[in-house]
Amino acid sequence: MATAIEKLPFIINPSLRLRSHSFQVCWHVVDAEALRAESHFAYPGRKVYLRKNVCEVMVQYFDGRFDIIYGEQTDWNAIGLQRWLRKEIRDAVVARANEILPARLHYWERQKGVRAAKVMVNSRLRRSTMGNCSVLKEINLAPMIVLFPLPFMDEVILHELAHLKHMHHCKSFWAHLSQLLGRDARELEKESDLFFSKYADLFFFLMKK
Ligand SMILES: [Zn+2]
């Protein structure tokens, strides 16, 4: 067990803090009896992780909030639990992305008087790509951006909307994006990169297929 767990770059346990404007993980410790009793109630969006037929952890996703209910005896070092939890968090992030990203993009389209041909949430973008815009003016957005602070999430969306007019990253693109953002795009990108560099490994770990 110990050797298997060492292969994971992150252990998901109650010290994990994941909280953005759009998505948050909330931890709740309850006593073993309460956990066992509660796990027998079906609840929309609830999933139960069993170990030896006993509830070890329950998770619940609703409206951007991912609750993790566990007991004091929960063994966070169990590889099976770690894999399950990572998948549940990833699925909740993807669900959240589908709930809010197209709507947020449409909001900015109305604000800025532009129109993409199509918007899709796409989990299969390359590691370095948070979004892209095709020559057909179809925009893809990575679900992970719901974990970003709102100004940085919006920056990704507006960056792709700016590509509707400029299909490159030349000076005219940055000038146009700055106009859409109402501030210096390069400066905002630096702030965003600084934030992302702190969390990139964790976010990629959580989101990998
Ligand atoms: Zn670009």
Image (cartoon, rainbow, N blue to C red):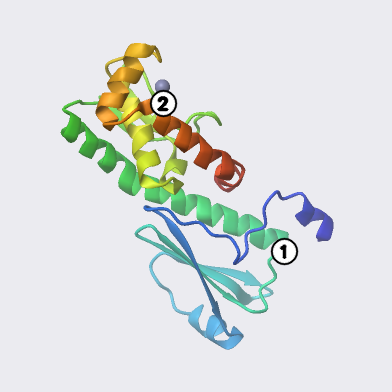
How many numbered markers are drawn? 2
Front: mark 1 or 2: 2
Q: CA distance from mark 1 to mark 2?
A: 44 Å
Looking at the picture, tell me which residue is in the foreground, 72 or 16. Answer: 16
For marks 1 and 2, the one nearer the N-term is: 1
Q: In what quadrant does ligand 1 lie?
A: top left
Residue at 67% x, 57% y: name it. 11
Q: Is residue 133 placed above or below 109 in the rendered structure? A: above
- The secondary element bearing badge 2 is classed as helix
Looking at the picture, tell me which residue is in the foreground, 96 or 162. Answer: 162
Instruction: Give residue 130's position: percent from left, percent from top.
Output: 46, 32
Q: Is residue 142 placed above or below 96 in the rendered structure? A: above
Instruction: Give residue 192's position: percent from left, percent from top.
Output: 46, 37
Q: Amino acid at mark 2?
A: Arg
Q: Are marks 1 and 2 in contact (CB under 8 Å)?
A: no
**Badge 2 is on which residue?**
186
Within 10 Å of disc 2 (Cα), the crowding (few <14, some 14-19, many 20+) is few
Residue at 65% x, 62% y: name it. 81
- The secondary element bearing badge 1 is classed as loop
Residue 113 relative to residue 99: left or right: left
Q: For the C terminus, give its image quadrant.
A: top right
Q: Amino acid at mark 1?
A: Ala
Residue 131 in view here:
no
Residue at 66% x, 74% y: name it. 74
**Badge 1 is on which residue?**
78
Within 10 Å of disc 1 (Cα), the crowding (few <14, some 14-19, many 20+) is some
Instruction: Give residue 86's position: percent from left, percent from top.
Output: 58, 54
Instruction: Give residue 114's position: percent from left, percent from top.
Output: 20, 25
Looking at this view, name the residue that lies furthest to the right.
3
Q: Is residue 182 placed above or below 80 in the rendered structure? A: above
